Amino acid sequence: MKALRVGVLAYPGCFASEVFGIPDLLVMARHIAAARGAVEPSYEVSVLSPRRRVLASGGSALDVSAMCPVDVLIVPGFELSPAHDLAGVLAGLRTEVAAIRAQAASGTAVVSICVGAFLAAEAGLLDGHEATTSWLFADQLARRYPDVTVRPERLVVTDRAVTTTAAFSAMFDFALQLIRDHDGPHVARGTARVALVDDARSSQAPYVDPALLPPAGREFSLGVKRWLDRNLATPYDLPRLAKEFHVSTRTMLRRFGDESGQTPLEYLQSTRVRRARLLLETTDRTVAHIAAEMGYADPGAFSAIFARHTGRRPRDYRATFHRK
C-alpha cells in the first residue's frame, strides 16, 4: 500500500502538542501494523510551514520544511482565550491562510484541530459546510462565519474534503479514524489500546462546562473591548473598527451599545483614563508622555477628557495620588 503523505502546518503561536500529537499516534500505528505483518511504512509525515522559522505557543522553536504536496494537511490549533484578540491573530496568519487555501485547491484533504477551524474558515474552506471546534469557541466560530453550519456537540466532522475536530484530545479521535480508514479496524483498535486513547467517544457534550462560557448576549461587545484594550494608543477610527469585526459602522454602534450601554469611543476613553491614572500614580512620566501613550497628540485634549472622567486635571490627580 502506498504511504499516505501527511503534512502538519506549523505557524507562530500554534500548539506544539497538536503539531506532534497525530504524527506520534501514527508512529504507534506503524508499529502495530508491522507487528501484524505490514512491510511498507503506512505514513510519511512532515512538519511544513511557509515561514523559515516558527515559534510555537510558549516559545518552542520548531524545525520545519517548505510547503510541498501532501495527501492530508493538518492545521493545529493556537493559543486562544476570551482575552485574546482573535481578529488580530488571524490577520497575522494571512500567509498560512493562503497556504491552506492553495493546498485545498490542489486536492489536498484539510484537517483542522480545535480552533484551527478559524484558519480553515478564513481560507474559505468551511463556507456551506458543517464543522466543529472546541465547545468553548463554537458560538464565536458561528458568529464570525455565518455561512458555516457549526455542530458544537460533535467531536469530528468531515464534510467533503474538509475535516474539523473539537479541542485538543479530539485530534486522537480523528487520528484513529484515519488509521481505521488506512490500516483497518484492528490496527486502529490496537493503537488505541497501546496509547490508552478512548476509541468509543462520539460527542463533546459531556465535557461542556457552562461556567466557562462567555456571558450570553455580550460576546460581541467583549470582543470589541478586547480589541480596543490592545490598541489604546491607536487613534480611534470607527470605520476601521467596524471592518475588524466584519460589520458596518451602524451595526457596530448598535450592537456594542445594546450590549454595553456605551459607544466604542466612550469605552476607549474610559479605559485610557484608567490606564493613565495608574501611570500618574506609579511613574514619573510627564503628562505629555502619558497622553501620547494613550493615543492623544494634544495633551490639552487628553487633560480635558481626564478631568471629565475623574474631576481632576492630570497634574492635580498626580499630586494627590502619586505613590512614593
Image: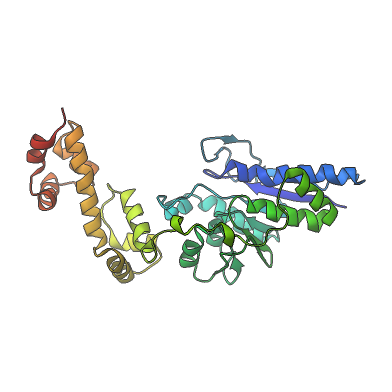
**Foreground residue, 7 or 283?**
283
Color theme of the render: rainbow
| Residue that appears at 7% across and 46% down | 312
Look at the picture and state if 283 lies above or below 22. Answer: above
| Residue that appears at 66% across and 42% down | 20
Look at the picture and state if 36 lies above or below 254. Answer: above
| Res 114 seen here | yes
Instruction: Classify residue 209 as left or right of residue 176.
Output: left
Indicate the position of residue 100 as horizontal and vertical percent values: 61, 55
**Foreground residue, 123 or 30?**
30
Number of callouts in the render?
0
Q: Looking at the figure, which quarter contains the C terminus?
A: top left
Look at the picture and state if 51 lies above or below 71. Answer: above
Indicate the position of residue 107 as horizontal and vertical percent values: 71, 61
Indicate the position of residue 266 as horizontal and vertical percent values: 21, 58
Residue extending farthest right: 37
Instruction: Classify residue 4 as left or right of residue 316.
Output: right
| Res 103 seen here | no
Indicate the position of residue 305 as horizontal and vertical percent values: 13, 51
